[in-house]
Image (cartoon, coloured by chain):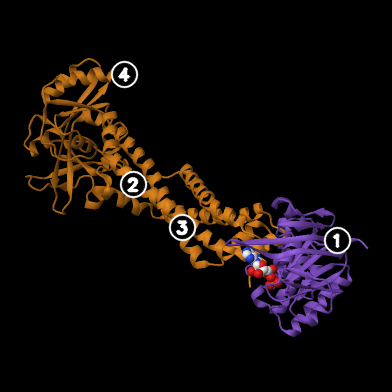
Amino acid sequence: MAYIIKAENLSKSYKRGSETVYALQEANLVINAGEFISIVGPSGSGKTTFMNMLGCLDTPSSGGYLLNGTQIAGLKERDLVKVRQENIGFVFQQFYLLPTLTVKENVELPLLFQNKGLNRSKEILETVGLSHRYTHLPKELSGGEMQRVAIARALINSPKILLADEPTGNLDTKNSEKVITLFRELHRLGLTIIMVTHNPELARIADRIITMTDGRIKTA
Amino acid sequence: MKFFSVALKNLFRRRMRTGLTLMGIAIGIAMLFSFMSFNQGYQESLRKDLRNMGAHMLAIAKGCPYEATSMILHGGEIKDYLTSEDVERIRQMPNVASAVGMFMNQKIFPHGKTLVVYGLDDAAFALKPWWVVKGDKFLDERSVVLPEEMATELGLSIGSTWSMPGVEGEFTVTGLLEKTGSQDDQFIYLPLVTAQQIFEAEGKVTSIAITLEDISKIQDVVKSVESLPDVQAITMSQVLGTAQTLMNSAQAMITSIVAIAVLISALGVMNSILMSVFERTREIGMMKAVGASQGDVFALVWIESVLLTLTGGMLGIGAAIAAGKLIDGALRGLLPFAPSGNLVAFDGQIVMVSLAASLFLGIVSGAYPAFRASQLSPMEAIRSE
Ligand SMILES: Nc1ncnc2c1ncn2[C@@H]1O[C@H](COP(=O)(O)OP(=O)(O)O)[C@@H](O)[C@H]1O
Ligand SMILES: [Mg+2]
């Protein structure tokens, strides 16, 4: 099977005073195109660090990362932007919608930075079940709706991989389920999804669960 | 959706802060605009005043040149006189086309105003060919010509009788001077001899207006005139220069005040935009995570800054135009010497320069916050627990 992600001895370290702290230590992982992965682990175990690396928001201290055939380690910010634009959709725990923009404008925000000349915001908002909220402002939405707008925003550039760092962390059970159902639907349509979660029940829905402790990936 | 609208909407997020920053910029640009308008108006009015003199140079009794400058333009009381003989001598000098003796003094009138009384003869009228006098100039020694506006204010018309405090007998208004738009609209005109009698200065004049046959010979004429005892010659360019000297220190002060105001408003913009960048650290991180480059983030913040200063600038220009009359009055009170006419005069060029200054302010004060924003790490968005 064709892999889309291959991490090889991927490490990220920080200097804390005189000692070196490893937020991520020699992570090795291969993810196939179309897989749905969940990452679990205690707080501070390096999940976010790993996600940042996979999403090309951060560069590794050592090791290699092949994304869709491109070696990411050593790329400059300018090139990282392109890689992100073409491959990655991000969903955050805190949604981060711009309060001054409508639902539609929030979803279309990434087009401002990379206009593919193709605006699928209507279609995508239908997919996430919010076409009736088109002209609403974020403050008029529930938390679950906001997160689905954020997911729609992540999808606008037709990414190959959807990265979600605790996407249900701020949601109640019912809304969490809605988000997960949506992820499953997107997965069924062929999207590669990597999701960090605290909730073991939600994690179980994925094809594969990866557990992290102390900056290391536990091999099951 | 455009960068522009995202930036604009963001400014509406903190209305109070945006409003205060706008006000700072508006004040700074209004001051700049008024200052430039004033410089222009001042120069124009001064030149116009001088053209309205109708002479190339003046001869006056030796004295303080500053006082003389103000006198020449606005009238007042001159204590040292020249004589009719001086007029005659100057008239004989080579290159002099005409020399006209004029008499000027002031009187306090019952309504509290100090008015300047001008004694003229026909030759003096000839220096002002653009004057339109309704009725007649002087019919006899007891004639008076008044500026039309002043006559209307006093309820006088041609044929009315008029008296002057401390002067026996009455005068007849024989002519009305149509509005000239210059300092000439503020004087009372009497026949030269009458004016001399009233102020007990028979045969004396306060100034001699001289026109030349060849303006390039002006320095020669100055020399000849000053060879007369106790006579000094003042050329129009000297008057201009003296007025400018009087203005220089005032101008230096105003320039520094304007510069400080503009600097403070620029710092205000920088501070306001910088604060908004720090508050939006996570949002900016999110934008980078969803595909914004450093340049995109820089542009967004920069546009905000420029929008702010351009809007503030337009408000300031509008306010300055609206307050032009007030500013004129305030400046008149502050200045050591002010010509008549509009002290504050603006044109399209001053508007454009002020707008350009607003744009420049936005570009300069937005650059640093925009740079800071562009350098923010996209990880900030995710690392937010
Ligand atoms: N910028 C940083 N500087 C120093 N230490 C960091 C930095 N980012 C993360 N860490 C450390 O790396 C470890 C992993 O953090 P993180 O990836 O956020 O874990 P998780 O998302 O699993 O809670 C933590 O100990 C954290 O304190
Ligand atoms: Mg985390």
Specify the amino acid type for callout 4. Answer: Ser
Q: Look at 76% across and 66% down and name the residue there.
A: A154
Mark 4: few/some/many CA within 10 Å (<14, 14-19, 20+)? few
Left or right placement of residue A4 versus residue B202 in this view? right
The residue that disc 2 covers is: B254
* 3 and 1 marks on the same chain: no
Label 1 is placed on what type of residue? Ile
Left or right of residue B46: residue A42? right
Closer to us: mark 3 or mark 4?
3
Mark 1 vs mark 4, CA separation in Å = 90 Å
Q: Earlier in the sequence, mark 4 or mark 2?
A: 4
Q: Which mark is residue B268?
A: 3
Report the front residue among B203 and A15.
A15
Disc 3 CB within 8 Å of nearest ligand 1 atom: no
Q: Quadrant of residue A148?
A: bottom right
Q: Which residue is mark 4?
A: B216
Q: Nearer the viewer, residue B111 or A84?
A: A84
Instruction: Quadrant for the C terminus of chain A, please.
Output: bottom right
Q: Residues within 10 Å of mark 2 (few under 14, many from 20)?
A: some
Q: SS class of the residue under badge 3?
A: helix
The colour assigned to chain A within the rendered structure: purple
Q: Which residue is mark 1?
A: A4
